[in-house]
Image (cartoon, grey):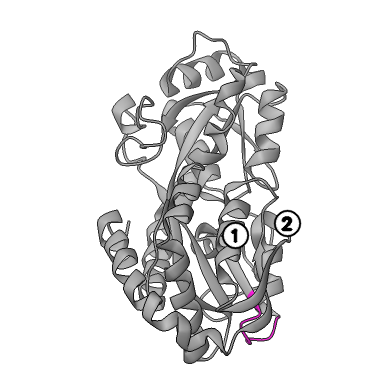
Amino acid sequence: MTFTRRQILQTTGASALLASLGQHAFAQASLETATIVTGFAAGGTSDTTCRRIAQKLSPDYAKAAVVENRTGAGGQIAVSYVKGRPADGATILQTPTSILTIYPHIYKKLPYDPMVDLTPVSIACIFDFGFAVGPSVPASVKTVPEFLAWAKANPAGANFGSPAAGSTPHFIGALLGKKGGVELKHAAYRGTQPAMLDLLGGNISAVSGPIGDITQHLQSGKVRILGVSGAKRSRFAPDVPTFGEQGIKDMAHSEWFAFFLPAKASPELVAKLNTAMKNALAQKDVIDGLGTFGLEAMSSTPAELTDLLKKDTAKWAPIVKEVGFTAEG
């Protein structure tokens, strides 16, 4: 992690005062309509984040704000779409940072350059990942090591789904398999929710995905989380041990959702949207609302987000090499 949670949360809290002072200055210059684009399906954590924030962009940033789900290619379609839009502030990208920091290592060709085609605005939230199993896995399997042993003994069930090929949860699942000495076949979906539906239906054995996408299905009684990816237990699933607690080393991974504008957006426009985002992310109903989905709201400066992208891109290079996954691009 580039920033500690406390550091960014302090930034979020301090920004509330700045936002309250600055919001009136921008009120008269609001856009007619702002569209927040996400590359993942409705109902998931990315979509939820977009909708919570969209509600807060009106009327100061835009007279109206809507969310558009442009799914496909593991989020690439959304990024490519925003890349091609005018840099007038009317089109905003919200994306997991892995699409910008991991994909350059696994695709020979990407339809975008993360550091050239987008303008960083602010982090939106941080979240951990969970590894969950469904009804096709025996109830006696209660830990990640037990699942890996079961998968080794039952090759037909040695599989897992994730929200996208090449995403952080994909690599988490693949790394777990390598550490357990079993090849877990990967199924890529257009978001975690479609994967969870297949998990509930018994079509796949496990899902690696954002903790909030999994916890909302626990009440069904058909899903159980075996482990979480954070350096410490998630406050959203406090009874679930981390991978590290289960003896699986070097498996602490969290991720951010972040907001971007197309390249060449003016500094004034970036500052205006950054202020609007900070204001939204500091509001209690947004913090509480995102919390129900396992998301910890926070914001950043554009420079901090740029630094995060650079450092995480470097971090994932050796991990991708270890897993050995590449994608046709």
Percent x, y of residue 10: 27, 63
The vertical placement of 300 against 226, above or below, is below
Residue 257 coordinates in the image, percent (x, y): 50, 59
Q: Position of residue 212 (x, y in %)?
A: 51, 40
For label 1, the residue is: 50
Left or right of 5 in this view: 180: right
Q: Is residue 147 magenta?
A: no
Between 243 and 213, which is closer to the camera in this rendering?
213
Q: Residue at x 59, y 60 (%)?
A: 50
Magenta span main SS: loop
Q: As shown in the figure, which amino acid type bears the numbered disc 1? A: Cys
Binning the other alpha carbons within 10 Å of mark 2 as few (below 14), some (14 to 19) or many (20 upward) gives: some
Q: Quadrant of the N terminus?
A: bottom left
Q: Note whether 283 is above or below 153 in the view shown.
A: below
Q: Amino acid at mark 2?
A: Thr
Q: Which residues are magenta?
A: 85-91
Q: Secondary structure at mark 1?
A: helix
Residue 111 at least partly seen = no
Question: Which is more toward the observer, 249 or 99?
Answer: 99
Residue 71 disc label? 2
Question: Left or right of 231: which side holds 136?
Answer: right
Q: Secondary structure at mark 2?
A: loop
Say which quadrant the C terminus sits in.
bottom right
Q: Earlier in the sequence, mark 1 or mark 2?
A: 1
| Badge number at residue 26 | none
> In x, y percent, where is residue 256?
45, 57
Dot 1 crowding, Cα within 10 Å, few <14, some 14–19, many 20+: many
Residue 156 visible in the snapshot: yes
Residue at 56% over, 55% down:
49
Residue 33, placed above or below residue 264: above
